[in-house]
Image (cartoon, rainbow, N blue to C red):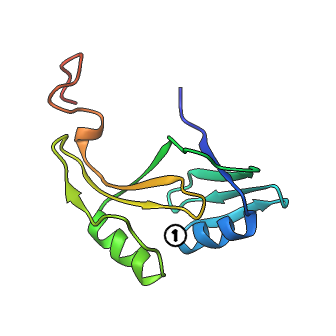
Amino acid sequence: MKLNQVTVGATDIPRAIEFYTRLGMTLIVEDGHYARFEMPAGDTFSVHQADTISGATTVVYFEFADVDTAVKDAEARGITFDSQPEDQSWLWREAYLSDPDGNRICFLQESPNRRFPPWRVDGRTA
């Protein structure tokens, strides 16, 4: 099984397009109610028209080889983060922001701990 893409709601598609292109994605599909973006590694991410966004509980994680540089680059393009990169007790380095509709986004440092943390249920280390 392979994750195809993540789609989040947006109350204003043009505003979402502007935000996600500024974040570094390339717009590849847009029909007024839906937009799909291609990410630098070829993965896709999309937004769809939603009347309201209430109490979003989803967090979308974008992984980077160097999260500190990725945050600085995004900030240089006008993106505002809620928190700067920080080492977490679960062995991830993360920074958080929200899109214009309040959908939570995490910039995550690339690490083998994503798949193989020391507390992995099956004990695998690679």
Residue 110 in the image: x percent, y percent?
29, 52
Residue 79 in the image: x percent, y percent?
46, 75
**Residue at point 54%, 62% (across, down):** 99
**Residue at point 66%, 52% (across, down):** 46
119 in relation to 14, above or below: above
Residue furthest to the top in view is 122
22 in relation to 49, above or below: below
Q: Nearer the viewer, residue 35 or 86?
A: 86
Does residue 9 appear left or right of residue 69 in this picture? right
Residue 118 in the image: x percent, y percent?
14, 30
Q: Amino acid at mark 1?
A: Leu
Q: How many neighbours does mark 1 have within 10 angstroms: few (below 14), some (14-19), or many (20 or more)?
A: some
* Quadrant of the rendering where the C terminus is positioned: top left
Question: Which structural element holds mark 1?
Answer: loop
**Residue at point 79%, 61% (across, down):** 30
**Residue at point 63%, 67% (across, down):** 26
52 in relation to 23, above or below: above
Specify the quadrant of the image occupied by residue 22: bottom right
Q: Nearer the viewer, residue 44 or 10?
A: 10
Residue furthest to the right in view is 31
Total residue callouts: 1
Task: Name the residue beneath numbered marker 1.
Answer: 23
Residue 9 in the image: x percent, y percent?
67, 49
15 in relation to 50, above or below: below
